[in-house]
Amino acid sequence: MSAYPGLFISLDGPSGVGKSTTVAELGRLLGDRGRGVHTTTEPSTSELGRFTRAEADHIHGRALACLVAANRYEHIETELAPRLKAGETVVCDRYLASSLVLQPLDGVPEQFVLALNRHILLPDLAVILTAEPEDISARLAERGRRHRFHDDPDGPAREVELYHRAAQTMTTLGVEVLVLDSTDATPTDVAKRIANTLPWRGGNVEPLHPHTHDDPTVNP
């Protein structure tokens, strides 16, 4: 277990549930409470992260899963770990839970995703925002299409289901998971709920280890 003094919070959920606004509100709220806070996002703002975001409509399946994981390891090494070592609270907009949803939606088995991410840092708290699929669809229609996953009319319902499954997977990895419904809540309300749930200190930030000593065999 790493002895990072910082606190690592990830925030995931279907498109349209208010993740980015909630991350900004949470960062502001924690800053007002005297924490040193750093907010970030995945794909990251590095050159590799910008490439991943720009090409996600054109690169599919395992290739995209590998690209997302590569950017995550870079993100950990260059941004997340240094901030956590400095004692800051890091809030990340999308992390492992999103990979456990979006990559399977793209035809990638969960086992493959977990194998790619077996050495990442796990969050102290993984927040998963959800909402009623009909409400998500209405928000997406108002906001407009942003990537190919929005082309499926059944996408919101499938994402909600897969995020609940991702919450269970994260729990089996030893991560504290907080699932919040944002259907009738403002981002400020959600941020306050998260802030009041935070542990006083970090300590669950460690690599994701497999259950066996050997690398898992990934089947198609």
Image (tube, rainbow, N blue to C red):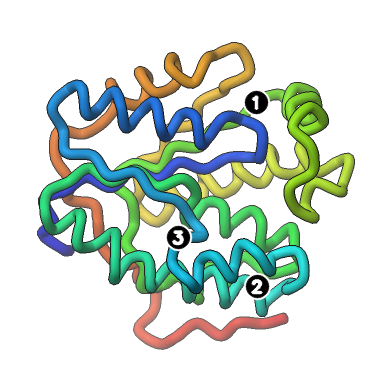
In this view of the protein, which residue sits in the foreground, 201 or 220?
A: 201
Residue 175 appears anywhere in the view: yes
**Mark 3 = which residue?**
45
Q: Is residue 105 above or below residue 193?
A: below
Which amino acid type corresponds to the residue marked 3 in the rendered image? Thr
Q: Nearer the viewer, mark 3 or mark 1?
A: 3
Which amino acid type corresponds to the residue marked 2 in the rendered image? Leu
Residue 29: quadrant of the picture: top left
**Mark 2 = which residue?**
64
Q: What is the x, y in percent for residue 159? A: 70, 43
Please tell me which residue is depicted at 46% across the width and 29% down the height of the picture: 22
In this view of the protein, which residue sits in the foreground, 138 or 214?
A: 138
Determine whether the residue tagged by mark 3 lies in a helix, strand or loop.
loop
Please tell me which residue is depicted at 56% across the width and 52% down the height of the picture: 98
Please say if the residues under marks 3 and 1 sit with CB atoms less than 8 Å apart.
no
Q: What is the x, y in percent for residue 90? A: 28, 46
- Counting the numbered discs, the total is 3
Q: What is the x, y in percent for residue 31? A: 22, 29
| Mark toward the start of the polypeptide (2 vs 3) | 3
Q: Quadrant of the C terminus?
A: bottom right
| Mark toward the start of the polypeptide (3 vs 1) | 3
Q: Is residue 62 above or below residue 104?
A: below
Q: Nearer the viewer, mark 2 or mark 1?
A: 2
| Mark toward the start of the polypeptide (2 vs 1) | 2
Q: State how far apart marks 2 and 3 are (Cα).
A: 17 Å
Q: Give the crowd class for mark 1: few <14, some 14-19, many >=20 residues within 10 Å.
A: many
Q: What is the x, y in percent for residue 212? A: 39, 79
Q: Quadrant of the N terminus?
A: bottom left
Side (left or right) of 54 relative to 106 = left
Q: State how far apart marks 2 and 1 are (Cα).
A: 26 Å
**Mark 1 = which residue?**
131
